[in-house]
Every structure is written in structure tokens, then in C-alpha cells.
Amino acid sequence: MRARAEADKRTLDPAMVPDLGFTDGYRQGFGDEAINARYFGPAHTKGDIVTLFEKANVVHMGDLMFNRLYPVIDRPGGASIRGWVKVLEKVATEYPKDAIYIFGHGNPKFGAMGTPADLLVFRDYLSALLAHVESEIKAGKPKEEVVKLENLAGFPDFHVPPGRGNRLPSNLGVAYDELTSA
């Protein structure tokens, strides 16, 4: 966070800087509740975690989940679309099926809460994004051509009109960069 703030020439509020870190997981009791935070690897960024409120049976996904929205893929922050696919699959299989899942972002029609099935819809979008861009690369198309797609087929709930609010061109560009980087 500090390095990113310096690179962006921003002042970072000290209250926003974490004072606790962990590599895989962390568990802490709070009265009658216990939280369990886990890191599964790079996805939206290189530092996203999944938090389970054990007694409440609530899983908070934060920015790992964009429910029926083209996501922000933070490549400078360490994003990995391939990794994101794996993280969503792990969460969908390893966390309680009957939990309440809270998402960082949601299409107004679908909301910011859901189920493991919603995680798999988003996983399918990310997988389709990679497959589409990979086929365009194999067809010899340059990045400038690949990012012109206005909406990805098969995901009508994600569709938004072309323009500033449509993050698909950015998603396509990030996927292109991820697939073509050494």
C-alpha cells in the first residue's frame, strides 16, 4: 500500500495501513464471534482475503466478488485473472454452502449478497474472458483490436452500454497483458 501510494504520489492515511499481516490464514475471537481470514493468492490484487464470520455464518468476499459486473482488475496491484478463477473455485467449494455471502460489488438487479453459485458465475465470466482473448491472440489480433469488443457473449447480465461505465475494454486489455507477458 505504501509503495503504491508513493508511486501514485498520494498521501496515505496511517489509519488505512494494516498493522497485522499473515501469509495463509488468521483467526481471532471477538466475544461470541470468531473471524477467520484467509489468503488464497493473487486475484483482484495480490492482497485480497476472504473473511468468514464463523458463528454468523457470513462470508465476506470484498473486492474478490463483482456480482454480474465487469470487474476492476488491478494489474498494477498484482492482479491475476487465472489466480482469481482458482480463488473463486476454492471459496465455492471450501466455505459453507448455506452461508450468507457478501460481495464488494453487485449489479443492482442482483445485489451485493449471494451464494456460491454467484461466485461460479463470476468465475465463468473470468474464464470466458481469458478464453476469448487467448483465441484473439492466436488469430493474430493486436491488443488495440481485441479491446474493441463492447460486450462478452454469454454474459448478458454483465452488459452495460459502451462508454465510460463499461469496464470490458479494460478487462480485455488486462487479460491480453496477462496472457502475453513472459
Image (cartoon, rainbow, N blue to C red):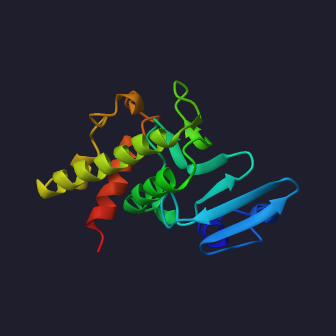
Q: Residue at coordinates 47% horizontally, 53% vertically from top-left? A: 93
Identify the image quadrant of residue 15.
Answer: bottom right
Side of 61 where 41 appears, left or right: left
Side of 163 where 100 appears, left or right: right
The x, y position of residue 44, in whole percent, is 50, 56
The x, y position of residue 129, in whole percent, is 31, 48
The x, y position of residue 113, in whole percent, is 60, 36
Q: Residue at coordinates 85% horizontally, 53% vertically from top-left? A: 32
Picture layout, residue 125 above or below residue 178: above
Side of 83 where 21 appears, left or right: right
The furthest residue to the right: 31
Picture layout, residue 101 above or below residue 26: above
Q: Residue at coordinates 55% horizontally, 26% vertically from top-left? A: 108
| Residue 73 makes an appearance in the image | no
The x, y position of residue 115, in whole percent, is 53, 39
| Residue 88 makes an appearance in the image | yes
Which quarter of the figure is the C terminus placed in?
A: bottom left
Which quarter of the figure is the N terminus placed in?
A: bottom right
The furthest residue to the left: 139
Q: Nearer the viewer, residue 124 or 75?
A: 124
